[in-house]
Amino acid sequence: MELRKDPITRSWVVVGHREEAPTGAEGCPLCPNPSAKSPSILAIPPGVDWQVRVVPHIDPLYRIEGDTGRKAEGIFDRMQPIGAHEVIVETPEHSRQLSEFSDEAIERVLTAYASRIADLKRDSRFKYVTVFKNHGVLAGEEWPHSHSQLTAAAFVPRRLKYELRAAREWFREKERCVFCDILRQEEKSGKRIVDTQGDYAAMCPYAARVPYETWLIPRKHNHLFEAPGLGANRLHFAALLGRTLRRLEKVSVAYHMVVHTAPNTRNPKGQLAGYWTTLAEDFHWHIEILPIVQTRSKSYSIKEVYFNTLLPEQAAEHLRKLDPNA
Ligand SMILES: [Zn+2]
Ligand SMILES: [Zn+2]
Ligand SMILES: [Zn+2]
């Protein structure tokens, strides 16, 4: 496994062969197994009666040891895929899905996300830590047991780089956060707001890439998912996430969910790298959910341009009307 940089798009690609995740034969690898010696990276609550547990991925894309060994190959760049790849087992119960959890149980999962992100960001080699969830076979889920995955990498992924650059430029021009601006306008019109709870909102973005694309975002500015601001109530966010997932599961067969938080700004000396000076003001964390909807008029991307067959304001209206508790 190695990382290669595309010199045109400047994005890093993990290249190499990967084994199929072992499933089936020895039973579910995510179910509690008292005889297994696999150590937990984190267990909530600690001990054998965990409700949420984080374990290393058995076939990781990134590995924790060593240096990036960044080097040139002629004009090209490559490096070792150092980083971390963990699995967040969201429940000890094999067939209970995240959307069916109580708000408190969802909050525990979010706490596990936050605690792992914060811990890995202490390592200055890791530039970006993210948590994602592929739910459903069509989303490429690795095991049916409810779980998410975390990766820490020595580079910032391309989509995030675009967001960070755009947010920084917006701030430079207007001295305002672009996400706060979007949210203010969306809340005023209400057209694309799906639901709110406390200081959090769920909305379909103006230029949604796929039908029912939904973002969850704090209404108070904060760039770090892992460090909720003073008075932030994660239980409110958990309740909103649960309702949103239940709504989306009524219209889609699978989804991708990804946490977008600020990148790691520490350099090896623990200082803030120069170009991130306004990060705390210009970036705003959020969670993006991209559902996979099976329709006859397929949404797809033609030559890298997304073609979405459903207007986001119609998507939001439909989602608002769905009863998440029915
Ligand atoms: Zn299981
Ligand atoms: Zn903001
Ligand atoms: Zn984003």
Image (cartoon, grey):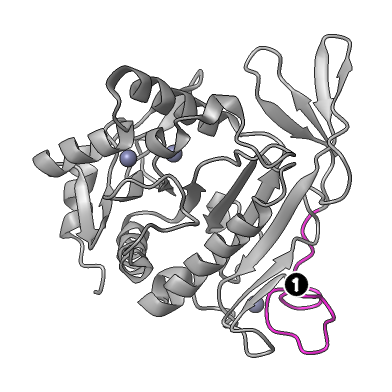
Q: Decide if residue 215 is on the left or right side of residue 120.
A: left
> Would you identify the image quadrant in which residue 103 lies?
bottom left
State whether residue 176 is above or below residue 290.
above
Picture coordinates of residue 267, whole percent (x, y): 69, 37
Q: Which residues are magenta?
A: 20-39
Query: Residue at horizontal 48%, vertical 51%?
Result: 257
Picture coordinates of residue 39, whole percent (x, y): 79, 75
Q: Decide if residue 93 is on the left or right side of residue 142.
A: left
> Would you identify the image quadrant in which residue 42 lies?
bottom right
Main SS class of the magenta portion in the image: loop
State whether residue 146 is above or below residue 11.
below
Query: Residue at horizontal 50%, vertical 78%?
Result: 96
Q: Decide if residue 120 is on the left or right side of residue 65.
A: left
**240 or 179, which lies in front?**
179
Can residue 235 be seen from the camera position used here?
yes
**Disc 1 marks which residue?**
24
Query: Residue at horizontal 54%, vertical 51%?
Result: 138
Q: Decide if residue 107 is on the left or right side of residue 248.
A: right
Picture coordinates of residue 183, whole percent (x, y): 23, 40
Whether 63 is among the magenta residues is no
Residue sitting at the far top: 75
> Would you identify the image quadrant in which residue 156 lies?
top right
Can residue 143 be seen from the camera position used here?
no
State whether residue 104 is above or below residue 269.
below
Q: Amino acid at mark 1?
A: Gly
User: SS for tag 1?
Assistant: loop
**195 or 311, which lies in front?**
195
